[in-house]
Amino acid sequence: MSLLETSLTRAVDDVSSRDTRRWVLQNRAVAWTVLALVFLDELLAVAAAAVWGARSSGPALAVCAALAVLVVWFLFASPKARYGGPVVRPVLKVLVFTAASAGLWVSGLPWWGLALLVFSAVVNGLAQLPTVRTAAASAVAAPPARRS
């Protein structure tokens, strides 16, 4: 191989590695943005349950409904759920987001219920992309940081 061919090969490798690094960083940013939106969606489901409870019976039911969603999510739908699984987790997510949307609907907020349902479907659909799933798996598998 001549000196010119070697130089051209190195230049192409440098450009492609820079492009690859940029692509990886952009995909990570998108993945973490989607994961942040998934978390926001989960918080909105808790808030929707509280709104339903408050409009149905008052503050006591609002607190109980929000706590019920939190406990169900913790036990069955969170990434480290004790009783979650490949079938239970997605089924429960659909049930929680559908119930939260329906709660807003029957509380007299049908457009907010519809908006929550569409947002939940889009965000959780995006969360199934391979890049996002890899980022989520790496976050769950990472050991806790040690404090000195």
Image (spheres, rainbow, N blue to C red):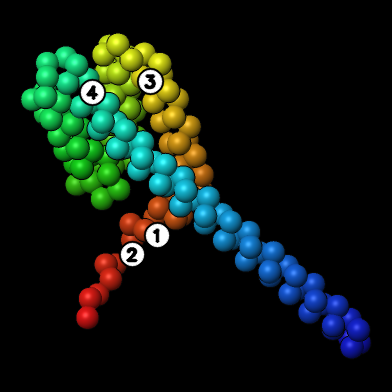
Where disc 1 sits, the SS reads helix
User: Label 1: which residue?
Assistant: 138
Q: CA distance from mark 4 to mark 1?
A: 34 Å
Residue 21, horizontal then vertical, whole percent: 62, 66
Callout 3 crowding tier (Cα within 10 Å): few <14, some 14–19, many ≥20 = some
Considering only order in the chain, which callout, 1 or 4, is on the residue closer to the N terminus? 4
Query: Does residue 101 appear left or right of residue 83 in this picture?
Result: right
Judged from the image, the secondary structure of the residue bearing numbered disc 3 is helix
Query: Tag on residue 112?
Result: 3
The image position of residue 14, as x and y in percent, is 73, 74
Q: Disc 4 marks which amino acid?
A: Val
The relative height of residue 90 versus residue 103 in the rendered view (above or below) is below
**Looking at the image, is mark 1 or mark 3 earlier in the sequence?**
3
> Does the residue at mark 4 contact the one at mark 3 (Cβ under 8 Å)?
no
- Percent position of residue 46, x then y: 25, 32
Residue under label 2, please give it: 142
Q: Quadrant of the N terminus?
A: bottom right
Q: Of the residues tagged 2 and 3, which is closer to the observer?
A: 3
The numbered mark, 2 or 3, whose residue comes first in the sequence reads: 3
Mark before the other along the chain sequence, 4 or 3: 4
Label 3 near label 2: C-beta < 8 Å?
no
The reply to whether dot 1 and dot 3 touch (C-beta < 8 Å) is no
The crowd level at tag 4 (other Cα within 10 Å; few <14, some 14-19, many 20+) is many
CA–CA distance in space, label 2 to label 1: 6 Å
Q: Amino acid at mark 2?
A: Ala
Q: Secondary structure at mark 2?
A: loop
Point out the frontmost of discs 2 and 4.
Answer: 4
Q: Earlier in the sequence, mark 2 or mark 4?
A: 4
Q: Quadrant of residue 23?
A: bottom right
